Image: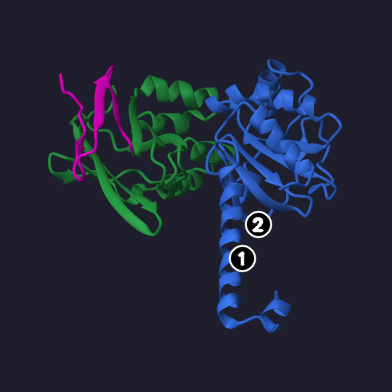
Amino acid sequence: MLLFLRSGVPDNMRFQISLAIIVLACVATAYAQASLPDGIIAVTPKKAPEILLKNMDDEPLTGFPARDTWTFVHFWASWCGPCKREMPAISGLIKHFRKNEIRIILVNTSEDDEAVFAFLGGIDPDMKTYMDRDGQVTEKWAPRGLPATYLVDPEGVIRYQALGGRNWLQDNYLEFLHSLTRGSR
Amino acid sequence: MVYGFCIMTLAGMPSSFAQNNNRYHYQDDRVRISITPRTPEMTTAFYYARGFPAKVIDTLKKQCFLTITIRNTSRDTLQHNIGKWVITSSGQPVMPLTRQYWFDWFRSQNIPLSIQSTFRWTLLPDALDFFPGEGEGGNIILPYTDQPFSVQMKFKLISNNMTQPFNVTFPEVRCAR
């Protein structure tokens, strides 16, 4: 670009080419947003807050952000209706990405073991969630509501957010998630 | 029987409104809103099931709980801010018991953080820019009154640096008892 600006290209042509580049960049950005599945928004990149939590088996979360892959961070609570409807799809997503192409982290907001065991046991006894027992980690992430899903890139930067709940096993959402792992976004 | 119809104080877009079983609804091509007043029994059951202490429930169930859902039905950003709502009863302002009010009250009662956090998640967000199609819900809490009251919600639609303010008013809402 600098070479082009310093070259001997006439001013009027230089202006036209610059304008074309800017327009193309705008179109590409708009297309990237428009091509996102319903309810997925590209957010202003922001470093993901820490998740210093343990799961139901008292195991601490390690290796976040994942560095070698994208991370799907999902905040939920058993009393939240849309969370209940979405959780079977999240269970399916965990099975779909069992080779860890995307790391999936569940964070329960402010509930105790009893409520969480009872809820997850009825959906998928193999599912594990990290326990934000006092809700303070969730506060730092400041989701717009529950459920809330963030997609964090391998640099630990939040790039996308999902608004509300959805069936993640639909083709358009799976294709979107796979596009992240392919690095095509 | 009081019919809770909505008054559009600006613009004449096609709209629909309804009230049934003490639930209030409004919809047009910008926003869809529902208001559901909760009885003390419902409030008690909801928070009891979430492990709230009896002293908290005793206080909460004496208030007027309104569960409100708002969905942006437009293609623009819908800006919402509870602080700009106008709630009146018999011409007098009714002040909602705000998130800050409850934060201070919970702290004064030494209520565990987990309970405080869950409680905050059950409240309607104070302010939010709704993306197209986005919906959120939650409670607002008023001091109980057996008198009807009006709820004027003020919104803004924002697109391409253009701002279009509009109001939706539910003129006769009642607390559930």
Q: Which residues are magenta?
A: B1-29
Density class for disc 2 (Cα within 10 Å; few <14, some 14-19, many ≥20) is few
Kind of element beneath mark 2: strand
Task: Answer above or below: position of A129 versus A123.
Answer: below
Chain containing mark 2: A
The answer to if B18 sits in the magenta stretch is: yes
Q: Nearer the viewer, residue A155 or A42?
A: A42
> Residue at left 25%, top 23%?
B18
What chain is tagged by disc 1? Answer: A
N-terminal-most mark, 1 or 2:
1
Circle 1 packing at 10 Å, graded few (<14), some (14-19), many (20+), is few
Can residue A89 be seen? yes
Rendered colour, chain A: blue
Across and down, in percent, residue B117 comes to: 55, 41
B77 left or right of A141 in image: left
Residue A80 percent coordinates (x, y): 54, 28
Determine which residue is flagged by label 1. A21
The quadrant of the image that shows the N terminus of chain B is top left
* Residue receiving disc 2: A46
Q: Is residue B111 above or below residue B161?
A: above
Amino acid type of the residue that numbered disc 1 sits on in the rendered structure: Ile
Q: Is residue A132 visible?
A: no
Q: CA distance from mark 1 to mark 2?
A: 27 Å
Q: Locate residue A175 relative to residue B60 in the image: left or right.
A: right
Q: Residue at x 25, y 27 (%)?
A: B17
Which quarter of the figure is the C terminus of chain B placed in? Answer: top left
Chain letter, colour green in render: B
Question: Is residue A185 shown in magenta?
Answer: no
Closest to the observer: A3 or A116?
A: A3
